[in-house]
Amino acid sequence: MTEQGITNAEYNYDNEPEWDTPIDPAAYVEDQEFFPRDISAQPQWLRQRLAEGQAHIEASGNKRRRR
């Protein structure tokens, strides 16, 4: 926010966010379950992370499935 009270926000949906601490790809699966996003609206990086997260969930024996 500027001194004049003006705010500015920029969004980048095409690239994965840069996190201070790496995010477990399974967290993206959980997020997708609570906030579904049609595959046509998912950027390539998100589809990749969802696939990685689902594989991790299945390998751990957790039977949660992707919607």
Image (cartoon, rainbow, N blue to C red):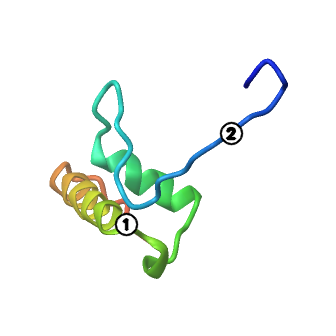
Judged from this view, the residue extending furthest toward the right is 4
User: Residue at horizontal 55%, vertical 67%?
Assistant: 36
Write down the quadrant of residue 34 in the picture.
bottom right
Q: Which mark is residue 8?
A: 2
User: Residue at horizontal 45%, vertical 52%?
Assistant: 30
Write down the quadrant of residue 35 in the picture.
bottom right
Judged from this view, the residue extending furthest toward the left is 59
Disc 2 element: loop
Q: Residue 39's spot in the image, x, y percent? A: 43, 78
Where does the C terminus fall, quadrant-wise? bottom left
Q: Residue 57's spot in the image, x, y percent? A: 26, 53
Disc 1 element: loop
Q: With respect to residue 23, does 38 lie above or below?
A: below
Q: Choose the circle earlier in sequence order: 2 or 1.
A: 2
Q: With respect to residue 45, does 16 lie above or below?
A: above
Which amino acid, by three-letter code, is at mark 2?
Asn
Q: With respect to residue 4, does 15 lie above or below?
A: below
Disc 1: which residue = 65
The crowding category of the residue bearing disc 2, from other C-alpha atoms within 10 Å (few below 14, some 14 to 19, many at least 20), is few
Observer-nearest of 14 and 21: 14
Observer-nearest of 55 and 36: 36
Which amino acid, by three-letter code, is at mark 1?
Arg
